[in-house]
Amino acid sequence: MDIYGGISAKENTQPFADYTEYMDTLFAWANNCLDDYMENLKQKYAAGDGGYKNIFYPDLEIAQTLCQRKIFIPPFQEQKEKESPLMDEILSYVNVRAKHTVTSGISLPFYELCHRLGFKNFTLFCFVLGILAATQTDYAAVFQIVNENGNLPVPTVESGAKLYFGNGFSPTEAYSHMSLCIEELSPILNLRIPEHMPFSAEISLDKRIIDFLFGKNPFQTDENYIRFFSRVPLETEAVPILANQWLLGAIETSFENNIRHYFLTGDEGSGRKFFIKKFCKNHGLGIVTLNCRKLFSHDYEFADKALWALSRECILTDSCCLLEFSPDKEERESFLEYMDMALIRLAQNNIPTFSLSREKLPLGKIPENGAELHFPLPDMKEREECFKFFAQKYSLSSDIDFSQMASQFLFTPGKIKFSLKSSKNFAFMRGSNVISKNDLLSGCHGQASSDLTLKAAKIETHFGFEDIVINRDQKEILKHAIDQVTFHNKIYYDWDYKKKYPYGQGMSLLLFGAPGTGKSMCAQVIAHELNLELYRVDLSKVLDKYIGETEKSICQIFQEAKKCNVILFFDECDALFSKRSDDSSSIQAFHNSKAALLLQEIETYNGISILATNHKNSIDPAFFRRMKYVVEFQFPDAATRELLWRRTIPKDTPLGDDVDIPFLAEKFEFSGGNIKNCILNAAFLAASEEPGTKVYMRHYLKAIRYEYIKTGKIFTKADFQPYAEEVFGE
C-alpha cells in the first residue's frame, strides 16, 4: 500500500518550493498525529474509560477541530495507526525532499540544524511540536488536552512520546527514546529538567531559536548576551600565509584526528586569529568570540547561563568559539576557574574552540581532545616577505631595504602591517605621500611593546661620533662594535656563518670608568649611529624580593627587546655583578643566580647589550670574559678636557672676550659630565643678569665653584687665581 496516499515516486523526490512548504509539511505530519491522538481520546471517553471525560470532552472537540484546520499540506491522505515504523517512513519522505531542496540551493534552517546535530526521528518530532506551541497561540488548547493539564500549554517529552507512538506507547519501551531526546535537545533548548520527573520537561522555545528558524537574520546573537559574545566576520581579502605556514597544516591534521580544542599562544600580531579564520573558511565554519574579561566579572550562576547561550550560538550558526584571555595578577585565580567552566561547557557539545593567550596559562581542566600550539616569531626571510607584501599598497622611497628592516625588527606579521600603516601617517605629517626610510623606522619604533617601558626607560639619542670626546683606541673599538651590527646579515646569512655560529650572534659591551667620563653618552652614540632605540634598565628596580619575580622581569625585558631589536643599557651593573664570595647565605645565592640568568639572556640576545659600571674592581672577573667588548673610559687629561670644553659649549653661545678655555681645562680636573654641568650653569648665570650680557669668565668660574660644592671637593681661593676676586669678591 502507498503510505503517501497516491503520491508518485517522482513527486516523492521533488524539492520543496521554499522553506514555508517544508515547514508546513512537517506541521501537517504533527497535526495528523495530534488529530489521530484526540480521535482516540474521544473514543476512549465515549466508552467511559476516561476519568476526565466530563472536564475535557468539550475542549477536546475544539482542539481536534483546530488540528484539522491546521493540516496545511498533508503529504498523505490515508494513514494507518501511528506506529513507529510508519512514522519513520513518513519522515524519510520529508527528509529526501529536504535533501534535494538544500542541494538545489534553497536554505532550510530547521533541516540543516537537525541534520548537523544528528537528531533521531523522535527528537525531531518533539522539536516540531515545540515550534507549533511557540509560534501559534491557539495550540495552547491542544497541548492542554494532550497533557491532561489545563495549566500546561506546551508539549513535554512524555506527551510527545504519547503522540509519536500512539496506541503503542509504553513508558518502559519509550524510555530510551525519551532519554535520548532530552540529551539531544538540551544543547539548544533550555529544558529545565525536573529532578524526579525528567520526562515532564517542557519543550519550550525562546526567542533566539524562533529568530534563528524564521527570522530575517538567522545569525543575530542572543539579545540577552550580545554584550558578551558576537560573530566575527571571515576575511574577504585573500591574504596569503606569509609566516609559519606549517601551523595551518598542524591544525588541519589534528582536527581530522578529532582534536576540538586548541590553545594558541603567541605575541600580538603573530597571526593566531588570521589562522583561525583561514581554518574556519576551509571548513565552512563561522566564528563566535567571547569577551572573557567582561563575562567573568559576573557571578557563577549568570556566567554559566551565558556560557550555555554561547555554546548554543555556536551550534546554531555552525561556528567555532574564540576565547581570548589575559587576566591581571589580582584576578588570575578567579579568571582561571571561570575558564575551566567555559572549557567544560564547550567540550560537552564538541564545539571547536580556540583559546588565545600570549603565554601558556595553568588551566586545570584541559579537554582530553585538546592541543597546544605556539606561534613563534617569523624568521628573517618570512619577515622580509611580510614587509614586501604589506608595502604593496603604499608608495615607498627607493632607499628602503626590506632585508635590513627584517633583520633589525623582529616583528610579527601584524606588527609589520601596523608599522607600515603608522609610517604612512608620519609621511603625511611631513606633507608627503611617499614613505621615507626615516618614516618607516619611526613607524617600527612606535611598535615597541608597552611591557618593555614598564621595566626600562627610553632614552632619546642625539649624539654622534662627532660629539663624543674619546681617545683613538676607544673610538676604534666602538666603530668595530657598530660594524658587527651593520654587517650582521652579510656575515651570518649571506656568508652562512649562522650554521657554524648559531649562538651568540648579538653584541655585548662593558663600559667602565669614573662617573661623567662618557659611558652613558657612548651608549647614545651607538644607538644614534645604528638608528636604534635605546632603553635604560635600572637593575635596582628589577631586583625583587619575591621568589621568581626577578627572573620573570629579566626574561620579560629581553623578550620584549627582541621584538623591536632595541639596545638595552644596564647602568650601574655592579649592583648585580659584584664579585662572588664563599658566603653560603641566601642573599649571596640570590645575587649569584640572578647574575647567571642575566648573563645567559645577554648571550642569547641577538641585539646589543651595553653594561656600565663606575666600579671596575667590584665586578667579578669572570663577567669580563663573557663580554665581546670591554672599553675603559679614563679620566680626561688636560688636552682632552680642553677639547671637551670647546665641543660642549654650543656654537651660538655669546662668549665674552675674557673666556680662557685653556686655563679652565688645565686648572680644573673635571670629567666630561662635570664640564657639561659647568657650561650649562654658567649660561644660566649670564642669562639671569641684565639683557644682552655675554657669558664671561666669571660665570664659568662661579659655575665651577658650585660644582665643587656639589661634589664635596675641597677648594681654596688659590685654586681660582688669578680670578679669585671675581669668584669670591673682596
Image (cartoon, rainbow, N blue to C red):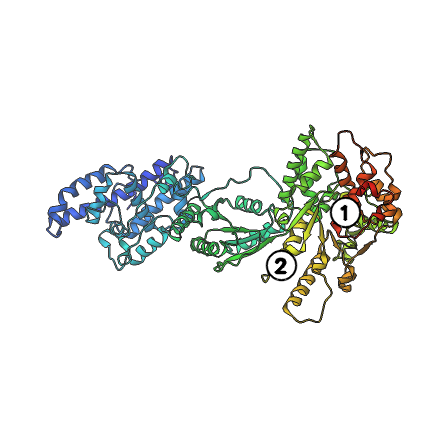
Q: Residue at x 81, y 49 (%)?
A: 671
**Residue at 19%, 39% in the rendered image:** 65
Q: Are marks 1 and 2 in contact (CB under 8 Å)?
A: no
Residue farthest front in this picture: 730
Q: Secondary structure at mark 1?
A: helix
Name the amino acid type tagged 1. Glu
Depth order, front residue of 424/517 = 517
Q: Quadrant of the C terminus?
A: top right
- Circle 1 or circle 2, nearest the eye: 1
Disc 2 crowd, CA 10 A, few/some/many (<14, 14-19, 20+): some
| Numbered tag placed on residue 378 in the rendering | none
Q: Is residue 252 left or right of residue 109?
A: right
Q: Position of residue 409 (x, y in %)?
A: 70, 46
Q: Is label 2 in a helix, a strand or a loop?
A: helix
| Residue 724 showing in the rendered view | yes
Nearer-the-camera pick, 383 or 675: 675
Vertical relation: 262 (above or below) 418: below
- Res. 550 mark: 2
- In this rendered view, identify the residue nearer to me: 373 or 166: 373
User: In the rendered view, does 302 fall on the left or right side of 236?
Assistant: left
Would you call the spot at circle 1 few (<14 residues within 10 Å), some (14-19), or many (20 or more)?
some
Where residue 154 appears, as percent x and y from the top left, is 26, 45
Q: Position of residue 509 (x, y in %)?
A: 77, 54
Residue 437 percent location from the top left of the image: 73, 37
Instruction: Give the amino acid at mark 2.
Output: Thr
Q: Earlier in the sequence, mark 1 or mark 2?
A: 2
Q: Is residue 109 rendered to the left or right of residue 151?
A: right
Q: Is residue 5 visible?
A: no
Return the residue nearer the eye: 191 or 701.
701
Q: CA distance from mark 1 to mark 2?
A: 37 Å
Q: Which residue is mark 1?
A: 707
